[in-house]
Amino acid sequence: MTISVRRSHARSTAPALALVFALASQAAHATDADPAPEPAPPAANNGIAEGSDIVVTGTKANAIAPVTASLRETQPASIVSRSFIEDSLPASADFNNVALISPSVANSGGENGVGLNESKTTIRGFQDGEYNITYDGVPFGDTNGPTHHSNTFFPSNTIETLVIDRGPGNASQLGESTYGGNMNLFSRETRADPSAEFKGAYGSFNTYLFRGLLQSGAIDKLGGTEAVVSAQYIKTDGRLSLSGYNQKNIFGKVVIPIGSSVHLSLLSTYNKNHFNQPDKNGVTLAQQALYGKYYNLNNDPTSQSYIDYNATTKTTDFEIAKLDGEIAPGFTFVNTAYTFYYDNETLSGNAATTLPTGVLSTTNANTTVTLADGTKTTGVPGYTKTNKYRVWGTIPKTRYDFGFGALTAGLWIERADTFRQQTDVNLVTGDFNYVEKKVTNPSTGAVTPLYVKFNQNSGFNHTEGFGELELRPVSGLTITPGFKYVNFNIFIHAAYNQTTRYAQNISKTYTKSLPFLTANYAISSQMSVYGQFAKGMSVPILGDLYVNNPSLSSIQPQTSTNYQTGFVYHGERLSFDADVYYIKINNKIQQETVIDNTGASQTAFFNAGRVLYKGIEGQVTYALPAGFAVFANGSLNYAKEAGTHNPVSNAPKGTAAGGLLYKHGPIRFSLIDKWTGPQYATNESLDPTQTFFVLARSVRISPYNDAILAMSYEWHNLRVGLNVTDLFNSRRIENIGLSGAGPAGNTFRGLNQTTDQLYYQPGRQVTGDITVKF
């Protein structure tokens, strides 16, 4: 059975995917002797791109593969289906846990348990903020830099499928930082038939999860309108000491037919997290020696790590309204309007690396605060933090198909408004802690209060225009040149700017023209080859404006030049794809100390150096008889500074995954292992002349792996499952936060025992779940 379905690129995007994976699921249940099911008609397709152009072939291999590729792709990609999320991962998983199955992907930060605190992902060594994440085609991220919070907006109950694009895409792929790749999330889909599903789960670290999902089915009285609603609640004690976490999420989506060829989709999701954790968590060697690898908080009210002094509440919402349809023969139009909100309210001790009073030294405990008159008194220093923003945007696109080709053009307009503050306090009393250095505004002479770290309003106005010309000169060949123009205006209106700590009004505009060229050739119905040349960029972050004299920081956006090529093969039992890539990064942003015309020392940012990324990647699945399959994927990755050959921090030299899968009738079973290769935690500092950066420290992080065992059995409306992550209880270091200089003579494994922070795998986690379907 071979079924090729091109993903619809607007309202019908995920229904086409749903069709693909439904057919794949049917194939998975079939034995070798079973006849192949007849394909249903493909969903409507308006052809307007929103990330990967997904074509999945409904073979036995793709029916069971945890990750696969598209025959029409023009850059390396991995497609992860809803069935993998449900069959092989615990329900608490976040989108980084879902993406981890892909080659060249590694993550860290899940030391409190799977999905139970924020995690971070690298793709080919590109860090969070150096690649883009979208939800139903809408890019999202923080407004002071395009980084992401893995468990804040979209828990796994809101995700239908996920596509990792290892490359900048073509001109229509939108985002502030596409040059390192794209992680495209797609929302849960509505169904034509009504249904209900309820899940309860309990597991390690006293973790509870409750989830419900309701499908209205097609409502005839409303012209076939379909709706889906999902709600989820998680509560846990967490793997780390005294690190409780709870999450509440509700998701809703309505798809309304307006005539035969026009659809309106309305989507909203609301999420609220509360947890206990220092703002900058991580265990030091000194803390580990006393309390173990998973020390985080304690019950000592004289300590900065006291549980009641370290609490965060994050509240978010995300709304999308999408109108799409055929406006004339060959002409399609889509407009996506959206808004999202993020509010982080944090109370934290100043330093998570301190120890309680009397341990090692009272100085290390740091239990003094400063009064308004400058005198010292007993107290516990900490701070309050607020980071909240609202983003609005619209993305109109149109496409005209003229037979031997198609032209796509569009515009992205976005506005963000942000408020951020940090204030020093005595955590015992809540009073101000007058501990900051005295700063005087050079223009007005105003003196900044000594308890203010910063208090600022900021934002950006962002516009991108793009066009693509898809040419089909001969059968099976698609060539797509494209062009994108970026205009990004960033501004600060601060009562007290971060770092400088006095009033500043700063605005800068960055522009860039980016060309693209991709090609895909279908050698046969089962195999294609592709190639890509693309320019990418990452907009400067807000921190680049935290300087005394902005005119000294004449930086340009970091840019990339990407070259990659590969092939995809989908046979009945064998699915295989591989690629090679070569990426040059220019205009790497660094900072330096300069002397201005008054003789004062000031911090400025500048463009210096290049970084080179290159490697080879591949993934393969082979379907055995009787519902069994084996799969493997892997990568060899190189990421180093071009001049010095210093390694890029937290960039694994390779990844590998493999496993055994079984899907037949009511039984699901998978045993999967993901290996992350060696990497380095590094930091840089200015040389003694303060003219260039040198590698101050480089600490090797050894390889580690994470095996996942999952099994379930379905009986009538009831499904019972068991999931074991980190099956072999690996508790190795997965990340290191370096701080300052290391110890002399490389003692303590090259780590500073009181300031460097270590992050460990959480160890074995067992979860059982029961699902009831109606």
Image: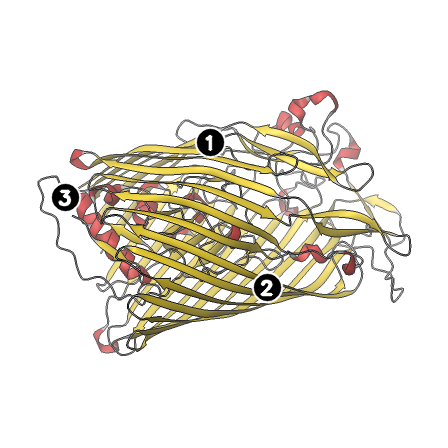
Number of numbered discs present?
A: 3
Residue 287: % across, % down: 65, 30
Q: Say which amino acid is labelled 3.
A: Ala
Q: What residue is shown at x 39% (from left), y 59% (from top)?
A: 480
Residue 659: % across, % down: 32, 32
Q: CA distance from mark 2 to mark 1?
A: 35 Å
- Drawn side of residue 182 relative to residue 219, left or right: right
The residue most toward the front is 473
In which quadrant of the rendered view does residue 504 lie?
Answer: bottom right
Q: Which of these two is toward me, 130 or 365?
A: 130
Q: Say which amino acid is labelled 2.
A: Tyr
Label 2–label 1 contact, CB within 8 A: no
Q: Which label sits in the foreground, 2 or 1? A: 2
Q: What residue is shown at x 67% (from left), y 28% (from top)?
A: 751
- Crowd rating for badge 1 (residues with CA inside 10 Å; few <14, some 14–19, many 20+): some
Q: CA distance from mark 3 to mark 2?
A: 50 Å
Q: Which of these two is toward me, 192 or 642?
A: 642
Residue indicated by mark 1: 763
Q: Which label sits in the foreground, 3 or 1? A: 3
State the mark number for residue 449: none
- Drawn side of residue 619 relative to residue 36, left or right: right
- Drawn side of residue 162 relative to residue 284, left or right: left
In which quadrant of the rendered view does residue 16 lie?
Answer: bottom left
Residue indicated by mark 3: 30
Residue indicated by mark 2: 389
Q: CA distance from mark 3 to mark 1?
A: 37 Å
- Crowd rating for badge 2 (residues with CA inside 10 Å; few <14, some 14–19, many 20+): many
